Amino acid sequence: MERLPDQGRSAQVVRSLDNMTDYDLYDILAELGYGLAPKTRIHRADAFFYKHDQWLNTLPTPTADTLKALTMQFARTGTDGLENPRVFTTPEVT
């Protein structure tokens, strides 16, 4: 992100101008750079739950619940929220 024009703020401007607030910066950059169809953060979280449902069910309940909480945190705030060390102190995750 630091190597992008204006240290990545340009991608955030594109997100605002294109009314893509429900999309992670990854999807905005993938669309701009590679023409990939963007997916909302909620769509990505739902896809994770769908694809990994069996795996999640094999995990101990506290572990699965933590992964589900982290996935929902991504759905709300994207990778920015996951990169924040305070994510591990949110009630859902703890």
Image (cartoon, helix red, strand yellow):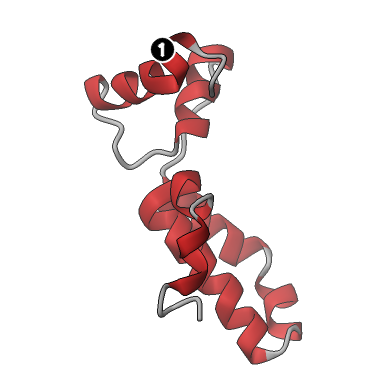
75 is higher (above) or lower (below) than 55 = above
Q: Residue 49: x and y, percent?
A: 58, 66
Q: Residue 25: x and y, percent?
A: 45, 32
| Residue ID at (54%, 20%) | 2
| Residue ID at (56%, 81%) | 65
Between 6 and 36, the one lying in front of the other is 6
Q: Quadrant of the N terminus?
A: top right
Q: Residues within 10 Å of mark 1 (few under 14, many from 20)?
A: few
Amino acid type at circle 1 is Asp
Task: Indicate the secondary structure of the residue bearing disc 1.
Answer: helix
Single out the residue that lies furthest toward the bottom. Answer: 61
54 is higher (above) or lower (below) than 61 = above
Between 44 and 21, the one lying in front of the other is 21
Q: Residue 31: x and y, percent?
A: 49, 21
46 is higher (above) or lower (below) than 7 = below
The number of numbered discs placed on residues in the rendered structure image is 1
Q: Is residue 87 left or right of 52 when viewed as pictured?
A: left
Task: Say which residue label 1 marks.
Answer: 6
| Residue ID at (53%, 16%) | 35
